[in-house]
Image: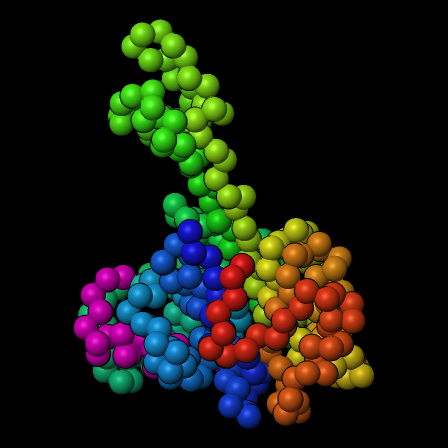
Amino acid sequence: MKFEVTILGSSSATPVYNRNPTAQLLNCNEKFYLIDCGEGTQQQLIKFGLKASKIDFIFISHLHGDHYFGLIGLLSSMHLNGRIKPLYIFAPQAIQEILALQFKHSDTTLRYELVYFAIDPEQPAVIFENRDVVVETIILNHRIPCTGFKFTEKKRLRKLLVDKLEAKNVPLECYPLLKRGADLTLPGGETLLNADYTTDSAVPKSYAYCSDTLFDVAYFDSIRNCDTLYHEATFLHDMLERAKETHHTTALQAAEVAQAVNAKKLLIGHFSSRYKTLVELLDEAKSVFPATQLAIEGTTYEI
Ligand SMILES: [Zn+2]
Ligand SMILES: [Zn+2]
């Protein structure tokens, strides 16, 4: 099953040096989840050959413009391109009012349904679940209410050892039972132990997205043992005071978070416009947490 994220925007605040404000596209089993939607997200999707029409779920972390100013344009284009299937938006409550005002004054009546889910910024909660994935909020510490999102794959059914089953002439209708872990008694009375005829499916993985936040142990429990942690790293650590003032994190702190929560991999992003090149941010994070990568736009990372 595919579980990977493509970076569409990696800049904080403003577009600069060919970097765009925050947006990411998560592919979980060929279903597409857009995480934040900064200005330019549509252009980035087009540039990287990703189809907006495949996106059915959008998650917005908070209402600073660099995380949602691309939304009205994207939603309008979906309308103009003939979308009819519903679109689900998980975002702070006020997004509904903001979009309604924009649609009202542009005299736009969408031909598809927008289904809103207002995120509670105080309590972590499961906000979405389907066959593939569970999404939980992460309560971050920013200047305005801000939540991250943790996507955890669902446990898959057991894998069949088909050659062994065929050798025993096991009827096909028994396969679903075996996939669910049951033993099997054949018509002749022989019992087949599940463990001999199936193998366990892959261990479910998780992706934790921490957008804008102050370094704060309060959210560590929500992201413990995640496979890939995306964490903002707006500044180098020599800018720690500025990071604190603006409720952001340094690259060093992002690495400390990854280490403290026992993440397997760290992706850093949300880079300040003061950094023309990013290698110093990467080096700083790697000095604490070697399994760090930069969130590079157009690059897809396996979770
Ligand atoms: Zn931001
Ligand atoms: Zn922000």
Q: Quadrant of the C terminus?
A: bottom right
Kindly identify the residue that appears in the image at 68 percent across and 64 percent down: 291
Can residue 64 be seen from the camera position used here?
no
Q: Is residue 80 magenta?
A: yes
In the rendered image, the residue lying farthest to the top is: 189
Between residue 278 and residue 140, name the one nearer to us. Answer: 278
Point out residue 7 in the picture as x, y percentages from the top left corner: 49, 73
Structure colour scheme: rainbow
Picture quadrant where residue 34 is located: bottom left
Rendering quarter of residue 104: bottom left
> How many discs appear?
0
Magenta segment: does it hold 202?
Answer: no
Apparent side of residue 173 relative to residue 219 in the rendered image (left or right): left
**Toward the viewer: 23 or 84?**
23
Res 201 visible: yes
Residue in the image at 48% along x and 49% along y: 153
The residue lying at 43 percent from left, 56 percent from top is 2
Q: Position of residue 28 (x, y in %)?
A: 42, 56
Q: Is residue 245 left or right of residue 180?
A: right
The part of the chain drawn in magenta is 64-86
Locate residue 11 relative to residue 28 in the image: left or right.
right
Task: Decide which of 212, 184 is in the foreground and name it.
Answer: 184
Looking at the picture, tell me which residue is in the foreground, 170 or 239: 170
Question: Residue drawn at (55%, 92%), measured in percent from left and top?
Answer: 17
As drawn, 271 above or below 96: below
Tell me where residue 150 appears, x and y as whole percent: 55, 56
